[in-house]
Amino acid sequence: MACFYCRKEIQENSKYCNYCGKKCITSEKQIIRAKYQLEHNRLLWDKMDETGRNKFIKSVDLDKLKNSKVEKYLREIGKEIEDIKSTRFNELISDFTQNDIDELAKLYYFDGTPCGQSICTTCTPSKL
């Protein structure tokens, strides 16, 4: 297991990182963070022009196939009901490693405009 913040290897199920001292994020929590972050990015995606979308997709550090899956998800998901979104999200990450999940959970695009979610890793991180 690696610390989400400093990326150093720490013991499995540690509560705090021995190196940076920050509280550890479990893989389950990280999946939740990735889901909220992806939804934040999707809401902003709808407002971006094609140039902004291309910059965003290139900033995601995943292999080409997974990047394509993320882009397809962002283009197609729209305002589907939550159950369908959850299913589509689970399908999206089905072959993702923990590092891929960590990558999805990172902040990529934020111009200060809130996305509108009541819970968001970018706009309202204190609620997570």
Image (cartoon, grey):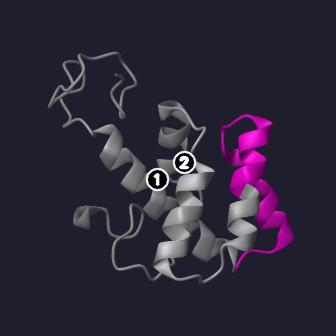
The residue range painted magenta reads: 47-70
Question: Which is nearer the eye, 112 or 17?
Answer: 17
Say which residue appears at 73% left-offset and 34% top-offset. Answer: 63
Residue type, numbered disc 2: Leu
- Disc 1: which residue: 34
Front residue of 113/64: it is 64
> In the rendered view, does 10 fall on the left or right side of 115?
left
Query: x and y percent of residue 34 in the render?
Result: 46, 53
* Callout 1 amino acid: Ala
User: Label 1 neighbourhood size at 10 Å, few (<14), some (14-19), many (20+)?
Assistant: many
Residue drawn 77% across and 64% down? 53
| Coordinates of residue 66 in the picture (x, y in percent) | 71, 42
Q: Quadrant of the C terminus?
A: bottom left
Q: CA distance from mark 1 to mark 2?
A: 5 Å
Q: Nearer the viewer, residue 56 or 63?
A: 63
Q: Secondary structure at mark 2?
A: helix
Q: Which mark is residue 128?
A: none
User: Where does the N terminus fall, quadrant-wise?
Assistant: top left
Q: Which residue is mark 2?
A: 104
Q: Is residue 97 above or below residue 75?
A: above
